[in-house]
Amino acid sequence: MKPYDLNTQIEQATACSIEKRKKLVSWFSRQNTAVQIEVFIEQRNQFFKLNNRNAKMEIVSLASFLLAIDLFYQKEKNGNKKNKSQNIDLIRNISQFEVKKHKKIRIKEKREKLLNIWSVVQKLKSEEYSFRDISKYIRKRHRFDASHTYIIRLWKELEKNEL
């Protein structure tokens, strides 16, 4: 199939131009994880709706994803309107969406840094280093201070090993 044919089929299934599709995907990438999960849950519903309409299988996944994003994008747009005289169910859905959208996920910097060098920790542990020695090694070689107890806690969480 030619790319032109695919684009026209996607446009027919979603009623979205190429520019709007780019805008929707960009909007999706800026959302937090909770909203992205909600979009994927809705994508499943859209997928079955498109499948029932006998759409071509090659485009059903992408089209359902775009339709799910568009649904949440429209919720955000409706939430930003000044006129809130919509029905109560719509307002309730919008307010629940706004709560999820504005929920901030804190990034734990120490955890992120340690996860970036986790392969080093695994290698040292396989070479029978103690967690105190691993902590000293990380402090010396990677200029990053992580206590041995923090490394143990993360080890138990990630490796599911009892020490």
Image (tube, rainbow, N blue to C red):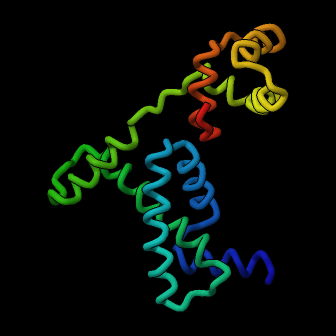
Asked whether 28 or 4 is in front, the reply is 28
Instruction: Report whether 55 appears left or right of 81.
Output: right
Q: Is residue 71 above or below residue 15?
A: above
User: Residue 68, percent across and down?
Assistant: 47, 64
Residue 101 located left or right of residue 1: left
Q: Residue at x 57, y 72 (%)?
A: 63
Please state the horizontal and vertical placement of residue 123, each as a whole percent of the image: 82, 31
Which image quadrant is residue 159 in? top right
The image quadrant where one finds the N terminus is bottom right
Q: Give how far across and how far down residue 71 sits, in percent.
A: 41, 62
User: Toward the viewer: 107 or 13?
Assistant: 107
At a point 53% along the width and 73% down the height, the residue shown is: 14
Between residue 130 and residue 108, name the one nearer to us: 130
Residue at left 48%, top 89%?
53
**Relative vertical location of residue 69 with respect to residue 148 in this rendering, above or below:** below
- Which part of the image, by quadrant, shows the C terminus? top right
In percent of width and height, residue 133 lies at 76, 13
Can you name the residue that lies furthest to the bottom here?
54
The answer to which quarter of the image holds residue 60 is bottom right
Position above or below: 159 against 115: below
Q: How many marks on residues?
A: 0
Residue at coordinates 16% horizontally, 53% vertically from top-left?
Answer: 85
